Structure formats: C-alpha cells, structure tokens
Image: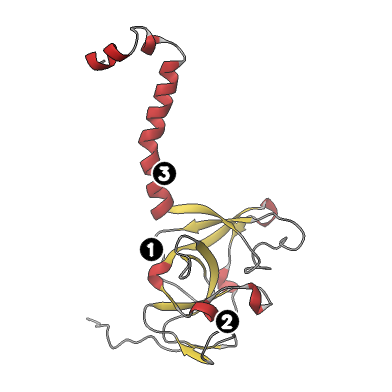
Amino acid sequence: MSSFLRGLYPSNFFRRSSIRPTLLTIGTLATWFPMYLFFNDHIAQLMWVTGPSMYPFLNTDYNSTTRKDVVFVNMRNPSEGLMRGMIVAFWSPYRPENMIVKRVIALEGDQVRTRAPYPFPRETIPEGHVWVEGEHPEDRMSLDSNTYGPISKSLIAGKITGVVWPFSKAGSIRWQDYRGNPRVVEGQPNLEAQQFYV
C-alpha cells in the first residue's frame, strides 16, 4: 500500500473485515462495467416494449394489464440482411434518445402506398433506407414511417429475435411468417452504384 494512503487512514483500516470485501466488490464491478457496456451496445440486450403500437404481436395484454413484453435484441450487424417482416429496434428520428420497436414492411426500391399524416400518397424507398410500421390496427396508435418517412438503416440498433417475458410467450420471433403488406409493391434496389466482380 502506498505511503500516501497509509497517511490518510489508520493502520488497521484496510484490515477490517467489512472494508476489504467491499473494496474487492467495487473493484470487480469497475472492471466488468466496460464489458457490460460493450456487450449491451454491440452484441445483445434485453428491451422492454412500451406502448400499444406493436399490439397484438407484442404487448398482447396491453388492453388488460400494464405488463410489458421483454424482448431479446441482437445488436450484431443490425442493418445487414434486413428482410420485409423483420422487427427492429431503432433510434427515433424525432427523439434520438429513445429506441423504438417496429416492423420493416418495405426495403429500398419498394414503393409504399402511405397513410396519413404522410404528405404524399406514395413513397419509393431510397437506397440505404427502410419503411417501418407498427402492428396496431388503428393507424393513430403508431408513430412510424407514415409520420417521419423512410428511416436510414444507420438508425437501426438491432433486430428483435425473441420474446423473453412473459414466459407464456417466450421463444423466438418467427418474422418469416410475415405475409407482406398489400400497400407495398416490391421493387429492386438501385444496383447502378454497386459493382459486381466475377
């Protein structure tokens, strides 16, 4: 122990049985905290789904209880391999501190017949963007691309791959069962900017 610390504390301070375990616990937590932050930001995290916008697919008990679904978010390569029907977590274009959960219904090159309050009746999804919407049958219950337009793929933080809570719904999310949306005309992404080598 340094002479500086010896001068500040009595000689038996660090030998007391209650102090040493506390310092050891604090030291252990301090070394693992950066690992936790890295894992939570880049690998995976659990997320509570709030609000009615994904009802009835998520928060199925929204009308009867205040219970929220807890989902597993895969944070690895969030904007790669996106498909129509996937459920994603992304940073809100209006409130960047909030993460939102919605379903991807259209990819770049697709054309969407929009709903109010979007200012145009149709929108073609530009390169590097997707169109996301909530599941709620009432349009007004979801703040989605019909409000803020196509979102940049760079805002996507992760893909929702499973439900953790409630246990009665726990399991993987089968986005592959998504049958599409009649308001979406599938298109082709702009491939002119991409070069293919054989």
Residue in the picture at 44% in, 64% down: 96
Earlier in the chain: of badge 2 and badge 1, it is: 1
For residue 167, side relative to residue 17 (left or right):
right
Q: Residue at x 54, y 85 (%)?
A: 118
- The type of residue carrying mark 3 is Tyr
- State the residue lying farthest toward the bottom: 121
Tag 2: residue type?
Gly
Q: Is 105 drawn above or below residue 22 in the view shown?
A: below
- In the rendering, which numbered label is found on residue 36? 3
In the picture shown, does residue 133 fall above or below 97?
below
The dot on residue 180 is 2
Report the disc number at residue 10. none
Q: Quadrant of residue 25?
A: top left
- The answer, for residue 80, to whether it is visible in the render is no
User: Which of the image's four quarters has the N terminus?
Assistant: top left
Secondary structure of the residue carrying numbered label 2: loop
